Amino acid sequence: MSTIATHLTGLERRALELMKQSDFGPEAVRVNAEIVALTPTNESAWTRLGRCHMEQRQFDDAVAAFRGALALNPTNRVATNLLTEVRRRRALTPTATERAATGFSAREFAALETLPHAEACRALRPRIEALFEVVNASTIAAQIVGTRQRCGESGSKLFHANSFYSEAAGHIFAFHHGGRWEPQFSIGWFSSPPLPQSCMRVGLGFSFSVAGRDPDRAAGQERVLASFERFQRTLEKSWRRELARWMGATGGFIQYGDHAPAVDLLPEASVEWLLNCRNAALLEWIFVGRWLFLDDPDDVKTLGHRAPLAKAIDDTFRSLYPLWLGAYTGSQSG
């Protein structure tokens, strides 16, 4: 046996010993890296090397190693499963720059995409609830809460703790306290998939769906349908041009059903769609508001830090408040 072959046999023996001991430390990294350098077609060594890098939190190196294993054998289930796990861990581990940020970066949207929806809610909860705190402190939030209180509704905050939800992977949504059967001040986060681009929406939504466990689903749907009709009357009477102008200036789009935002519709056409919609109950969801996209550099700056993001939400809610008021109370004065 040649010197190289003897050395390689010793390395392989040591690599297996370390793996049996669940030792994925620096020695294991060194041993397996030397094996793949000597025998680049050693699928098992690539997989072990990836596991070592993953446990050392060297996530980019781990991804590269697992890809090396899968290039040799695309059906390697161990490498496939570990590649999924390392991507999940990387998504939840902020860099030093991202730790200083307080908003929603590519990392948070990656977590939304890769984690089961309940786990994504838990992972993003600190950032979402920190954002709620800032939004709740705004004067427009107090104005909305005060309007609801004068109408006999409860609640001292616009968004309460734990008032965000996810029913499917890649989507988290929140609406103001008490808003299930009201015109909703709504916030939503989407990854890609399910939408073409990762994004966040902020605006006014109407949920007509009778799915779920609400005991008053039939009456609730009638209530929100009446709200949408008042919204249409308010829009027709005094807000047709103003809403189109606002949408054009802020990146506003409509959304309905389970479709992506209607980015192909010009603001004037979107407003006409809202005015002419007669099948709201069948669509189950209609929304108009501002969208922030992760592939837009200016939107990335807004999304990435809590203060500018909260200001964008405040500006959006403030701009749409008269429309909400018309839909909620039938009044067009603020």
Image (cartoon, grey):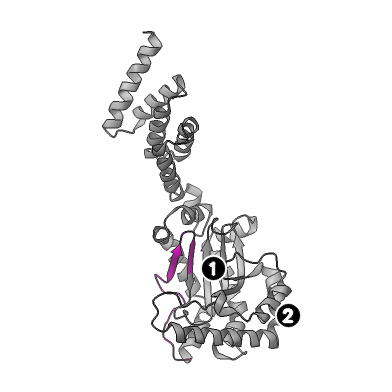
Amino acid type at mark 1: Ala
Query: Can you tell which mark lies on residue 310?
Result: 1
Residue at point 41%, 34% (across, down) = 50
Placement of 169 over or under 317, stated as above or below: above
Dot 2 falls on a residue whose secondary structure is helix
Which stretch is magenta? 151-173
State the residue in front, 176 or 112: 112
In the image, residue 305 lies in the stretch drawn in magenta:
no
Task: Tell me the residue that label 2 is attached to.
Answer: 241
- The image position of residue 166, as x and y in percent, is 44, 65
Q: Is residue 205 visible?
A: no
Identify which residue, 168 or 105, lies in the foreground.
168
Secondary structure of the residue carrying tag 1 is helix
The amino acid at mark 2 is Arg
The quadrant of the rendering that contains the C terminus is: bottom right
**Could you tell me which residue is drawn at 37 percent across and 24 percent down?**
31
Q: Residue at x 65, y 69 (%)?
A: 252
Q: Quadrant where the N terminus lies?
A: top left
